[in-house]
Amino acid sequence: MARVLSPWCKQAKIRLIELDMTVPQLAEKVGLTREYTSAIVNGRAYSEPAVKAISDVLNITETACSLS
């Protein structure tokens, strides 16, 4: 069964596309590993500081990105 992404995760993915930015580029900007950044964006992991940092870089709101 496919995982249902939270609104924040969807917003982050859309913004990455709009900015023509890859997850490795985002990871470098927020100072996290590519793997961990991918896990946050895809809803497999959650960290409030990481979500805040990613939200700041992508200029999106920090609504909950809960694990489903």
Image (spheres, rainbow, N blue to C red):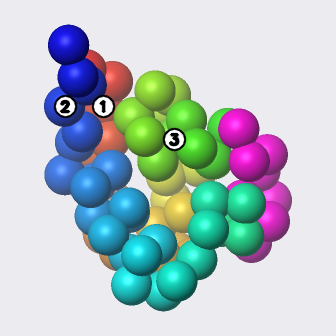
Res. 26 in view: yes
Q: Residue furthest top?
A: 1
Give whichever of 41, 53 is nearer the camera: 41
Q: Position of residue 55 (x, y in %)?
A: 46, 67
Q: CA distance from mark 2 to mark 1?
A: 10 Å
Q: Hey, what amino acid is under mark 1?
A: Ser
Residue under label 2, please give it. 4
Position of residue 7 relative to residue 36, above or below, is below
Asked if marks 2 and 1 touch (Cβ < 8 Å), the reply is no
Q: Quadrant of residue 8?
A: bottom left
Closer to us: 32 or 10: 10
Q: Which label number is shown at residue 66?
A: 1
Residue that badge 3 annotates: 40
In screen coordinates, is 34 left or right of 10? right
Classify the position of the N terminus by image quarter: top left
Q: Amino acid at mark 3?
A: Ile
Q: Residue at x 54, y 63 (%)?
A: 54
Residue in view at x 26 percent, y 55 percent: 10
27 or 22, nearer to the observer: 22
